[in-house]
Amino acid sequence: MNEIITFGQNYKLIPGIKVFCESTKDKADRVTIIGIDLQPEVTQYLETQEHINLVDGRQIAKKYNVNLQISPYTLKVIFYYLYCKHLSNAENVFVCDFTDMFFQKSPFELIKNSKPYVTSENYLIQDCNTNSTWINLCYNADIHNMLKSKEILNGGNIFGNKVTVIDFLKDLCDDLKQIISRIGNYPNPDQAAINKLVYFDQHRYNILNGFEIINFAHHGTAKVDLQDTVKVNGKVPFIIHQYDVIKSLENFLYDKHNQ
């Protein structure tokens, strides 16, 4: 069994939610949304989607004593870990961002071994002020110097065999706990932690860097063909992430999936 898992907090019914739900319909055996304080119109919409498994994040938080005041970027990792470890009965999982993900093919077709998969943004850490800042703040200049020549690994998706993904998520939770103990409730620590953990022990992971899952954060000038199957630079990505960078693509997807 394959399961896509995401997390949302305090959302209104924005178009990206419908894009996510519509595009995941035939991409996994189960699509789970862990929700915290979603607006009533979101809950009502999700309950009409037969393939969606809506999980109350507050119940998980209460059972496992999760502090809901910490950053959503930290919370999502904690909830992914707790859900995968205690509630999911899938063999393979894909944990990901929610409102800026568009699925064209099943990501589970990409799994070739039992190691967890992460995705490169195909852009160097040293060339990105935002990622450099995150790493310097969450760790220090020495760690940044060790990582700066590496490609940015995106924090918006982790997937693979559930057992090894759980191990990775547990390591991330432990690292995030240490970051919070050093600098407090920083809003965006997850991507820094993923880059540090993966590159410090790289043999344990698969890194996709062929635009199988494209992130548009640094590729806003890519050539996009707006057809039923979207092509980017002549190729069909399995998943398109941060499609809002290219407004013509965002509008196309919103129009298509928000009838």
Image (tube, rainbow, N blue to C red):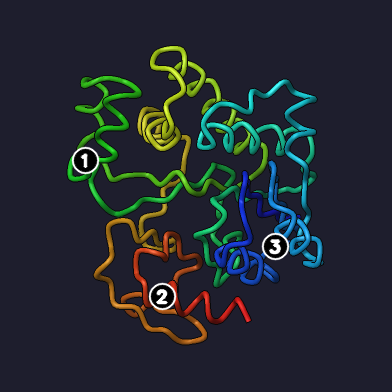
Name the image quarter holding residue 173: top right
Q: Residue at x 53, y 46 (%)?
A: 158
Density class for disc 1 (Cα within 10 Å; few <14, some 14-19, many ≥20) is few
Name the image quarter holding residue 245: bottom left
Numbered circle sitting on residue 249? 2
Question: Left or right: 112 with respect to 62?
Answer: left
Q: Residue at x 74, y 54 (%)?
A: 40
Which amino acid, mark 1?
Asn
Density class for disc 2 (Cα within 10 Å; few <14, some 14-19, many ≥20) is some
Vertical placement of 133 versus 162: above or below? Answer: above
Residue nearest the viewer, comparing 43 with 155: 43
Find out whether the residues at labels 3 and 2 contact each other: C-beta distance under 8 Å: no
Q: Position of residue 33 (x, y in %)?
A: 70, 51
Question: Left or right: 69 with respect to 184?
Answer: right
Q: Position of residue 31 (x, y in %)?
A: 71, 57
Name the residue carrying label 1. Answer: 129
Q: Circle 3 sits in a helix, a strand or a loop, which is it?
A: loop
Which amino acid, mark 3?
Ala
Name the residue carrying label 3. Answer: 28
Q: Position of residue 59 (x, y in %)?
A: 80, 33
Vertical placement of 216 versus 167: above or below? Answer: below
Name the image quarter holding residue 256: bottom right
Mark 2 or mark 1, earlier in chain: 1
Q: Circle 2 sits in a helix, a strand or a loop, which is it?
A: helix
Q: CA distance from mark 1 to mark 3?
A: 36 Å
Q: Circle 1 sits in a helix, a strand or a loop, which is it?
A: helix
Mark 3 or mark 2, earlier in chain: 3
Q: CA distance from mark 2 to mark 1?
A: 26 Å
Vertical placement of 1 versus 221: above or below? Answer: above
Of badges 1 and 3, the one in the foreground is 1
Q: CA distance from mark 3 to mark 2?
A: 24 Å
Q: Position of residue 247 (x, y in %)?
A: 36, 72
